[in-house]
Image (cartoon, rainbow, N blue to C red):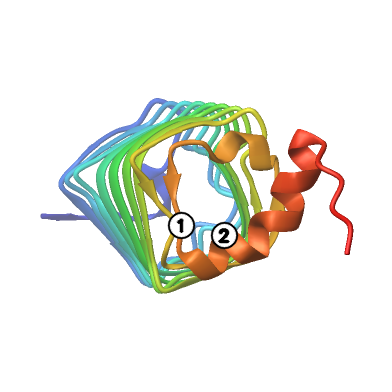
């Protein structure tokens, strides 16, 4: 595997089996770049631009960013471990067979994205935005989710039983999700409001 440096991240870069380790990549523009079988660990990627990038068969570990921009990007067969990210903006993207384990993401923006086989394990999520997204086979395991937005989402085979949900928006988009009995009780007032039920004592 090749050793990369900050200057490898540039628009339209074609990166094959490159390892980025312990680097300050702040503000680099890698729009439309292609990452194939790459590794990134212990790097600062604050302000990195990945608009339209393709991230394939790649792993990120202990990566940090206040803000990371990746709209209209493609992520396939990717593992993201112990990330510390403020805002991860990836709307209108395609995520396929992605696993996110550990760490904290304050805002994961997957609006209008196509998501298939996304696994979230032991992650703290401030805001998970799936509004207007098509999501199939999302599995959440032991995650704290402060706010989940499924407004106009289309879910299929999604298992949310491992999510500790605090705020939910777009309850009408939850069709196709699996929840626990306790979660259902918590959701009852929102569901009632959504269908116009008047609940009286």
Q: Residues within 10 Å of mark 2 (few under 14, many from 20)?
A: few
The residue nearer to you, when weighing 153 against 45, is 153
Quadrant where the C terminus is found in the figure? bottom right
Residue 127's disc number: none
From where the camera sits, is residue 82 visible?
A: yes
The residue depicted at 65 percent of the width and 35 percent of the height is 172
Q: Secondary structure at mark 2?
A: helix
The residue depicted at 87 percent of the width and 46 percent of the height is 198
Residue 142 percent across, percent down from the top left: 41, 74
Seen as rendered, the residue at the extreme left is 1
User: Is 151 left, or right, of 192 in this rendering?
Assistant: left
Residue 52 percent across, percent down from the top left: 47, 26
User: Is 74 left, or right, of 91 in this rendering?
Assistant: left
**Residue hosting label 2:** 184
Q: CA distance from mark 1 to mark 2?
A: 7 Å
Q: Is residue 137 above or below residue 124?
A: above
Residue 116 percent across, percent down from the top left: 32, 36
Q: Residues within 10 Å of mark 1 (few under 14, many from 20)?
A: some
From where the camera sits, is residue 146 visible?
A: no
Residue 16 percent across, percent down from the top left: 18, 39
Whichever of labels 1 and 2 marks the residue nearer the N terminus, that label is: 1
The residue depicted at 10 percent of the width and 55 percent of the height is 1
The residue nearer to you, when weighing 88 against 113, is 113
The residue depicted at 76 percent of the width and 56 percent of the height is 189
Query: Are discs 1 and 2 less than 8 Å apart at CB?
Result: yes
**Residue hosting label 1:** 179
The picture quadrant where one finds residue 81 is bottom left
Q: Is residue 101 above or below residue 155?
A: below
């Amino acid at each position: 595997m090749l050793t990369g440096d900050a200057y490898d991240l540039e628009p339209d870069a074609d990166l094959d089996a490159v390892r980025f380790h312990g680097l300050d990549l702040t503000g680099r523009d890698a729009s439309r770049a292609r990452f194939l079988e790459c590794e990134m660990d212990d790097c600062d990627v604050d302000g990195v631009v990945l608009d339209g990038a393709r991230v394939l068969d790649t792993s990120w570990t202990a990566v940090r960013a206040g803000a990371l921009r990746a709209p209209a990007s493609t992520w396939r067969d990717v593992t993201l471990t112990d990330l510390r990210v403020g805002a991860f903006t990836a709307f209108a993207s395609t995520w396929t067979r992605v696993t996110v384990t550990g760490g904290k993401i304050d805002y994961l923006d997957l609006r209008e994205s196509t998501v298939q086989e996304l696994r979230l394990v032991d992650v703290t999520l401030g805001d998970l935005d799936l509004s207007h997204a098509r999501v199939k086979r999302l599995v959440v395991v032991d995650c704290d989710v402060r706010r989940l937005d499924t407004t106009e989402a289309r879910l299929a085979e999604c298992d949310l039983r491992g999510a500790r949900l605090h705020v939910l928006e777009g309850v009408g988009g939850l069709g196709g999700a699996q929840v626990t009995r306790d979660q259902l009780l918590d959701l009852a007032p929102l569901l009632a409001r959504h269908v116009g039920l008047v609940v009286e004592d």
